[in-house]
């Protein structure tokens, strides 16, 4: 049972520390997808709850009103991300429609470049709004193509097939779409790279973005639990990569990824 708490924050547009993103908007604190590797679980320290990550959502019910007020302080041509520490289209969005309402407000600022990042095909509900934006990109997070792995590492997220199908639909509707392969899980994601990059090529995805696994948020415990379910022999390999500060694995993986991107003529960007 997911704990739902309605809150009324004083602000909702935040300056972003993410490369190429100026501001972020998070309609929710917490995420029902409950991904084992999620770095956003550090947000728990800002709220009062005993529930584990994935089992609570704090709903910023006044978020659309705040966006309307705060937009005036956002400089022209800024980049805005929905969202950086939650999925804007997690299941709770079906009820509250905060992301949709925020997008409707953002339409008043047609100079802004809007980025959306999600794991959910619920974004298809808002195609009519998305098509109104002159500068908008919708990204889907996919780190493997295996529904059994999804159930282990992303228990509350929609099936991967639905994400891939949603990407195709958005592309057919003329909406610029990108693939977010992050975090690249050692010895797992690499097995699906060629298929994912090939998909991006065949469907004319704008680009693919890659990043490494970040365990600074205290997510090693849940990652380890997921590895125990999938393949416990990987735990020692992960420890060697994540705790020894040995970057040779990711250097080699990046080189392999670049070769695949060149092979399929796909524009690839890296955060490492």
Image: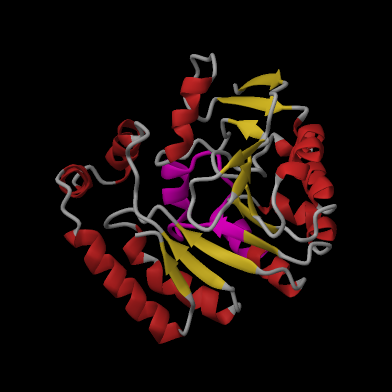
Q: Identify which residue is drawn at 46% across, 21% down.
A: 45
Q: Identify which residue is drawn at 71% across, 49% down.
A: 122
Q: Position of residue 151 (x, y in %)?
A: 47, 44
As drawn, 268 above or below 64? below
Q: Is residue 128 left or right of residue 85?
A: right
Q: Position of residue 140 (x, y in %)?
A: 57, 58
Q: Identify which residue is drawn at 75% across, 33% down.
A: 63
Magenta-colored stretch includes residue 239: no
Quadrant of the rendered structure where residue 203 is? bottom right
Q: Is residue 220 left or right of residue 153?
A: left
Q: Position of residue 99 (x, y in %)?
A: 74, 43
As drawn, 187 above or below 92? below
Quarter of the image where the C terminus is located: bottom left
Say how many tags the image has.
0
Write the start and end of the magenta stretch as one range.
Answer: 139-166
As drawn, 250 above or below 6? below
Q: Position of residue 9 (x, y in %)?
A: 69, 23
Quarter of the image where the N terminus is located: top right
Quadrant of the rendered structure where residue 186 is? bottom left
Q: Identify which residue is drawn at 50% across, 18% down.
A: 51
Q: Is residue 219 left or right of residue 264?
A: left
């Amino acid at each position: 049972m997911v704990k739902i708490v309605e809150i009324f924050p004083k602000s909702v547009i935040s300056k972003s520390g993410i490369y190429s993103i100026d501001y972020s908007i998070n309609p929710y604190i917490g995420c029902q997808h409950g991904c084992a590797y999620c770095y956003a679980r550090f947000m728990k320290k800002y709220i009062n709850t005993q529930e584990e990550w994935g089992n609570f959502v704090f709903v910023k019910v006044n978020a659309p009103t705040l966006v309307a007020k705060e937009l005036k302080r956002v400089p022209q041509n800024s980049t805005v991300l929905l969202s950086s520490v939650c999925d804007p289209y997690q299941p709770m969005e079906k009820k509250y429609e905060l992301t949709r309402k925020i997008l409707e407000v953002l339409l008043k600022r047609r100079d802004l470049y809007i980025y959306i990042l999600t794991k959910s095909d619920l974004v298809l509900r808002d195609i009519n709004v998305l098509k109104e934006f002159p500068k908008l990109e919708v990204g889907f997070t996919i780190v493997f193509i295996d529904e059994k792995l999804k159930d282990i590492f992303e228990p509350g997220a929609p099936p991967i097939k639905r994400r891939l199908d949603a990407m195709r639909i958005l592309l057919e509707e003329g909406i610029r779409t990108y693939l977010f392969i992050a975090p690249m899980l050692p010895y797992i994601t690499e097995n699906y790279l060629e298929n994912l990059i090939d998909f991006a090529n065949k469907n004319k995805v704008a680009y693919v973005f890659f990043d490494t696994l970040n365990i600074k948020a205290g997510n090693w415990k849940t990652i380890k639990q997921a590895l125990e379910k999938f393949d416990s022999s990987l735990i020692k390999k992960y420890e060697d990569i994540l705790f020894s500060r040995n970057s040779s694995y990711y250097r080699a993986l990046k080189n392999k990824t670049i070769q695949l991107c060149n092979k399929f003529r796909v524009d690839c960007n890296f955060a490492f």
